[in-house]
Image (tube, helix red, strand yellow):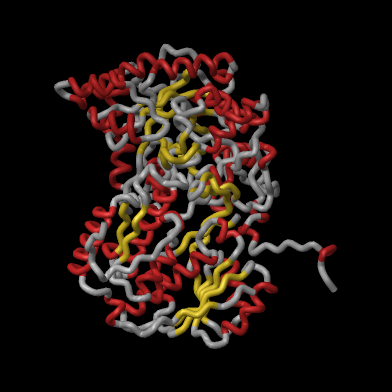
Amino acid sequence: MIIAQQKPIKDIAAMIEDCKKVLLVGCAGCVTVCLSGGEKETEVLASSLRIMRRLQGNPLETVTITATRQCDPEYIEPLENLVKDVDAIISLACGVGVQYLAERFHDKWVVPAQNTMFVGGSRTHGVWEERCGLCGDCILHRTGGICPIIRCSKSILNGPCGGSQYGKCEISKDVDCAWQLIYDRMKALGKLDKLMEIQPPKDWSKSRDGGPRKAIREDVMIG
Amino acid sequence: MKTESKLQKLLDSGHFAVTAEIGPPKHASAHGIRHHAQMLKDYVDATNITDCQTAIVRLSSIASAVHILDCGLEPIVQMTCRDRNRIAIQSDLLGAYSLGVRNLLCLSGDHQKFGNEPSAKNVYDIDSIQLIYLMRRMRDEKLFFSGEPIKEHEPRFFIGAVANPFADPFEFRVARLEKKVEAGAEFIQTQCIFDMERFERFMEMVRERGIHERVHILAGVTPLKSWRAAKYLQTSVSGMIVPDDIVERLKKADDPKREGIEICIEQIKHIRTIPGVHGVHIMAIAWEEVVPEIVERSGLYPRPKVE
Amino acid sequence: MRLQYSSNIRIIEMPCSGTIDHRVLLQAFEDGADGVFVAGCMEGDCHFQKGNYRAKKRVNAVKKLLDEIGLGGDRLEMYNLSAAMGPRFAEIANEMTERIRQLGPSPLRKNKAGTSRKEGDVA
């Protein structure tokens, strides 16, 4: 899922300081699962903003709603009635949701309440970890199911570098060296010889370096 | 002979090589590096020029190399994969060759987190092993990284790499060294050695695989100025092992700087007895002026001449 | 046993302190409370295992939030006591009342502009 973390409330408040009435739109997708932008977080943020503004003697009116997903036009469409009389929309979705709202309601001021951080999973309740670098050309079959693109701080394809010690990355004792993990796993699988192959340079044009990407499935297109 | 490198000529003809390291300054004057080059030129065969080491912005390694060449000393340009994509790396190395640089050391580079621009975006378009492979191919097969032919004047570098016997997983370190040799590395400089026992075990594994016959290994040493410097390397630099007895020896010394030099000389003398080591790389970090004494007292002076 | 405690306290009963939600706490302040305290069971005595620990974590999170938005986290506190500890309840009630008195009335009451919440329906 996409992991996002709410921005400091002061920053969000600053984005809407000129507004009298705002719509806060939560998202029932990834950000609900990672507990940062679902129904509850949307209401907490609305309440916090109202309190802040009342303390400033400049009350703010809020409307809250949580869409099934903000990354699908069909779930944004029904917001139209709510959008009409607000001065701004605060999206608690990932960056995709913010942009989908801005695209659909092009005459509205749409602001992000979250910092979209990474694609990952939950480690334990309340802890999420990055697992995929979205490089567009998966190599996990060559690295024992551990991604060096995102889990190695240097994205090294022929690791580990000389900064790996005691299983940790040179950047921090709290970060596992991805290549130590890869080594351990390949060893356990009896596939260490695979690590002797020189991995060729990566084709980054399949990643974001090639410009915004698009995926098309003609067989499911309608019309 | 594949290249015009003097270092390669020395190593290939069986001499025990001596290289040093010059760290470019955090300003735009070459005065200091030229001074160090003058001081070192009769005592070492070539000197590394670090490439913004520990990710601190410094005068460029290629520009520094030109000053050093001008002083009559052969430079080894360090190129990290941290700051340049494959376009910039190729362009800079074509330029370096055109300016007379003949030795290249390929590294991953320290993470930018350690430097003075921790919010910079790192590049790592390619890694150090890919860089070695691509530069070897550029020289021997006259191809750009993309595979496009170089019609003429391909750069012909003597290609080096680093090895860290003190990083983990230890048992894979020799394998990765072999991978670098497979990719095209012709000389290797190691991380500073303080744990001689571990280095000897490393060299034993190197000899078992016959790697020392395919590549020139230069053992890295660093004279320490104080026990605090030793302690810092021991506790704060990932991929370093500094045994406690070195820290203690410096702590007990009346003149720690002298003691640091003595330790370094002892280490070099010992390293010369280890089969398969073809030279020594002296990294006197911000202490370049002690290198001549260390070289002389280790019995490595005068340096052999090659044409 | 009839115990005297400050008469300015309004008790909201919940089945377990673990059902405390950030929203309930914030609503209390929005609706005009000068201070809020959550009374959970003694640590280790939760009928639902960890309800009171969870409550404490949430209370701490909301205290931080109250600091951030300028109302002040001191207006909120978590206490642990059992249902049999009547005198302790009275003591806490008086202690909290005293604390809030020192802090003064909620600044939200000075700027009371009516609640302005509206809820849309989920599409």
Question: In the rendered view of the protein, which quadrant contains the N terminus of chain A?
Answer: bottom right
Q: Which residue lies furthest to the bottom in this view?
A: A85
Q: Can residue B94 be seen in this view?
A: no
| Residue A23 spot, x, y in % from top left | 52, 78
Q: Can residue B288 be seen in this view?
A: yes
In this view, A108 is above or below B101: below
Q: Which residue lies furthest to the left in this view?
A: B254
| Residue B92 spot, x, y in % from top left | 52, 50
Residue at position x 32%, y 56% from top? C78
Report which quarter residue C60 is drawn in.
Answer: bottom left
Residue sitting nearer the eye, B264 or C62 = C62
| Residue C16 spot, x, y in % from top left | 44, 55
Residue at position x 27%, y 74% from top? C106
Residue at position x 51%, y 85% from top? A86
Compared across the picture, whether C69 is left or right of B152 comes to: left
Q: So how many labels did they put on this image?
A: 0
| Residue A215 spot, x, y in % from top left | 73, 61
In this view, B105 is above or below C25: above
